[in-house]
Amino acid sequence: MDKVSGRLTVFFEEPFWIGVFERISEGKLSVCKVTFGAEPKEYEIYDFILKNYYRLRFSPAVATAVKEAGCNPKRVQREVRKQVQNTGIGTKSQQALKLQQEQLKTERKAVSREQREAEKQRQFELKQQKKKEKHRGR
């Protein structure tokens, strides 16, 4: 059975509060970025996770090294303090977010291209129809 771990990092990035969900499964890291707006309270974050976690769109998975968690409580406390002081997100997370952004960009381009082609085709059909109507009366 594979171990799945997740982490949420909330930080202030002018002018909004940002949450970064990191999910590690099968040695692969996938990330999702959420904008909260005003500073969220702990209960608001917990409520958001309960209601919206399954609707989050995670980035494509990126290979990462999985470390086993240490059981020494002082070390764990030190690591937590270091993470709290550390502003921003890890480089792997940034790469995963960038990958997701590029993927969404290509999807958006494809959809807009299809819409543009459909509109061109519709205009062409309209011109052809008008041409036929002009010749109908002779």
Image (cartoon, rainbow, N blue to C red):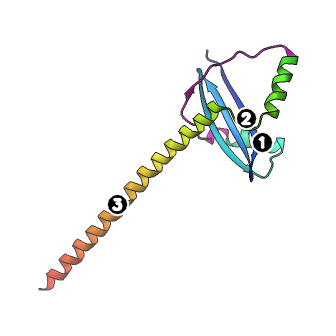
Q: Identify the residue shown where x is 11% and y is 86%.
A: 138
Q: Nearer the viewer, residue 85 or 107?
A: 85
Q: Amino acid at mark 2?
A: Leu
**Quarter holding the N terminus?**
top right
* Vertical position of residue 73 compared to residue 96: above or below: above
* Residue 109 horizontal/vertical position (percent): 44, 51
Residue interval drawn in magenta: 53-73
Which secondary structure, mark 1? helix
Label located before the other in sequence (2 or 1): 2
As drawn, 110 above or below 71 = below
Element on which disc 2 rests: strand
Res. 35 visible in picture: yes
Depth check: give the residue in front, 45 or 97.
97
Q: Residue at x 73, y 43 (%)?
A: 48
According to the picture, the residue beneath numbered tag 1 turns out to be: 45
Quadrant housing residue 95: top right
- The residue pinned by badge 2 equals 8
Residue 110 placement (x, y as % from top left): 41, 50
